[in-house]
Structures are given as structure tokens and as C-alpha cells.
């Protein structure tokens, strides 16, 4: 089975890749995030099980959301950007598996990556995605407002997510008409609509009777979307199927790669299944929709 070099190396990078970010984290709400009444002390642990033979850094108790910029190298930079939303059930963030490692891969293919550290765990008395949606809207607006200094095209800013992070990416893709928090500055007056969306083993999208969860409202203006899904990811496969169907019915360009095996929560790591080749398919898709340009085949 074909595998890129990064699939073989990614495990060894997982615990030190965070230090490779090219800029310090940017606090999204310098005066405090909306509706946060107390400051939490962030925690990180790596003893919650391994993926691809390597530990996973799990972060929680985030009350001050941030973004960290991974600038694409000049020799490969395409001008495109991607906001990366790790998963973790809206309780933790799988910060290296579905965050830093993904940002490094995006840099390899010429995309400036922005890693979102959104608020977790779920806030009592609020919808699971309510605070994170504020964070992702703020992040996209900030990125678009600073496109020139980041050397990116403000019309080629995407969002991607894994599991719960994919649900958050869907919420961002369908909730951009108005901000869900009080406006702070000029960045909040700029559209937070992503230009394209990538969902990897999404969670929480499916309702009953082939319907989406009620908070998700797909329209013809939902951005072009690609889904990566394994058939044996039984608790979550309907999220991909139902969302794909909704996109099709709304006339939104949609791509889905459905693999027979792979499970859930593999990120970019080599778990020995065919689903591990999904980055190839994403590169083809990004090339097809004009986000990046792949080298011509020999």
C-alpha cells in the first residue's frame, strides 16, 4: 500500500512538533472570550492510549482560545490557507494527532496552516458547539483580515476538522451570516465563510430518518466540501452519509471517499489500513478545485 514518507515519520514527530510553529499563539479574544466567567488552567496528558504506536497529546480546560500559524515555506507556498480544528468530543483536543501533525503536512503541500485551540470541555448549560463556534468564526475573520501579512489569498481560506472538530467545521460552513458574539474590531466585520471544507471522520452530524442534526442548515452557499470516512466507523458513518446527501440536494460540490476499514481517530498516522492514503485524495481534490497546483505527472 502506498504511503508518503510523512506517514512513516509522523509518529516520531508527534511529541516535539508543537515547537515547530513559526509564530507564537495569537489570543483570539484578548479581553476574554465571550461568556467565560473564570480562567481555566490548561492541562495536557499523553497517557490516554496510542495511535499508530505513538502517544497522543490531549489538551483540555481551554478558556482562552488561540490560533498558531504554520507558514508554508516560500519555495512551495500556494497562497492558500487552512484552519485546522482537532477533535476530541468537545471535551479535549487531540492536539498533535489532529493538529500539529496535520499542519506540518499542509505546509508540505504549500498550504499555510492555522491551528485552532478552541474552548473545551463543554460548558454547562450551553450547546456543545456554542463557545467553539464563536472561536472558529473569530479565527476565520482574523485570518482573512490579516491575509496580506500572512501572504495568503483571502479567497482561498479553508477549514478542516476531525471528529468533533469536523462538526465544528460544518458549523462554520453554515453559520457565517452573523457573528455569534459581540463584534470586537474590523476583523469581525469580514465574512467568516470558509472557501472550502475538509471533514475527516466527522461526528455529531446525523439526526434521525436520514436527516442532519437540527443545528445544521445546509444551503446552496455552503462551501465545497470533501469527506473522508471508513465504513467500519459505525458510530459515525451516518454523519458523513447524511451530510453528503444534504450537500448533494443543495447543489453544493461534494466529494466523499469511503473506505471499508479504518475505524476512527487515525489522523495522519500509519494504522495499517487503506484509509491511511487519504491525504493523496485530498491533494487531488485541492488541485481540482484550484486551491493548490500539483506537479504535472511524468
Image: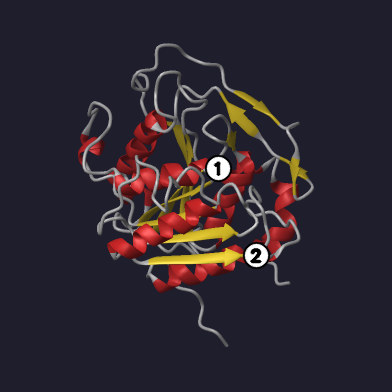
Q: Residues within 10 Å of mark 2 (few under 14, many from 20)?
A: few
The tally of labels here is 2
The secondary structure type at the circle numbered 2 is loop
Q: Position of residue 258 (x, y in %)?
A: 56, 65
Residue 252: in sight, yes or no? no
Whether tag 2 and tag 1 are in contact, CB under 8 A, the answer is: no
Pick out the residue farthest to the front.
Answer: 209
**Left-right relation of 191 to 133:** left
In the drawing, does residue 55 fall left or right of residue 234? right
Q: Which residue is mark 1?
A: 21
| Vertical comparison of 288 with 47: above or below | below
Q: Residues within 10 Å of mark 1 (few under 14, many from 20)?
A: some
Q: Nearer the viewer, mark 2 or mark 1?
A: 2
**Position in image of residue 252 (x %, y %):** 32, 63
* Residue 63 image point, x, y percent: 47, 22
Q: Does 199 sit above or below residue 254?
A: above
Label ID, residue 260: 2
How far apart are the alpha carbons under marks 2 and 1? 35 Å
Q: x%, y% of residue 67?
A: 45, 37
- Against 103, residue 164 (above or below) is above
Q: Nearer the viewer, residue 235 or 61?
A: 235
Residue projecting furthest to the right: 53
Evaluate whether residue 101 shows in this view: yes
Residue at 36% from the left image edge and 58% from the top image edge: 246
Q: Which quadrant, please, contains the N terminus?
A: bottom right
Amino acid at each position: 500500500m502506498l504511503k508518503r514518507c510523512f506517514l512513516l515519520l509522523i509518529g516520531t514527530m508527534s511529541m516535539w512538533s508543537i515547537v515547530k510553529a513559526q509564530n507564537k499563539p495569537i489570543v483570539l479574544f484578548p479581553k476574554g472570550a465571550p461568556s467565560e466567567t473564570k480562567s481555566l488552567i490548561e492541562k495536557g496528558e499523553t497517557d490516554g492510549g496510542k495511535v499508530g504506536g505513538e502517544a497522543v497529546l490531549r489538551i483540555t480546560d481551554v478558556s482562552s482560545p488561540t490560533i498558531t500559524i504554520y507558514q508554508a515555506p516560500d519555495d512551495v507556498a500556494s497562497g492558500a490557507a487552512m484552519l485546522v480544528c482537532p477533535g476530541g468530543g468537545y471535551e479535549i483536543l487531540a492536539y498533535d494527532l489532529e493538529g500539529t501533525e496535520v499542519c506540518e503536512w499542509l505546509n508540505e503541500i504549500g498550504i499555510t496552516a492555522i491551528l485552532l485551540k478552541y474552548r473545551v470541555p463543554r460548558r454547562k448549560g450551553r450547546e456543545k458547539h456554542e463557545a467553539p463556534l464563536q472561536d472558529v468564526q473569530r479565527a476565520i475573520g482574523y485570518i482573512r483580515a490579516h491575509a496580506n501579512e500572512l501572504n495568503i489569498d483571502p479567497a482561498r481560506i479553508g477549514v478542516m476538522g476531525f471528529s468533533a472538530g469536523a462538526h465544528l467545521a460544518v458549523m462554520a460552513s453554515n453559520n457565517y451570516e452573523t457573528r455569534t458574539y459581540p463584534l470586537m474590531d474590523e476583523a469581525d466585520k469580514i465574512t467568516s465563510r470558509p472557501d472550502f471544507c475538509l471533514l475527516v471522520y466527522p461526528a455529531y452530524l446525523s439526526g434521525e430518518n436520514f436527516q442532519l442534526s437540527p443545528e445544521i442548515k445546509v444551503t446552496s452557499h455552503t462551501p465545497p466540501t470533501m469527506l473522508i470516512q471508513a465504513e467500519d466507523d459505525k458510530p459515525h458513518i451516518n454523519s458523513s452519509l447524511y451530510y453528503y446527501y444534504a450537500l448533494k440536494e443543495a447543489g453544493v460540490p461534494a466529494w466523499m471517499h469511503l473506505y471499508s476499514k479504518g475505524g476512527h481517530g487515525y489522523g495522519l498516522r500509519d494504522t495499517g489500513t487503506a484509509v491511511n492514503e487519504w491525504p493523496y485524495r485530498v491533494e487531488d481534490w485541492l488541485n481540482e478545485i484550484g486551491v493548490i497546483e500539483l506537479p504535472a505527472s511524468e
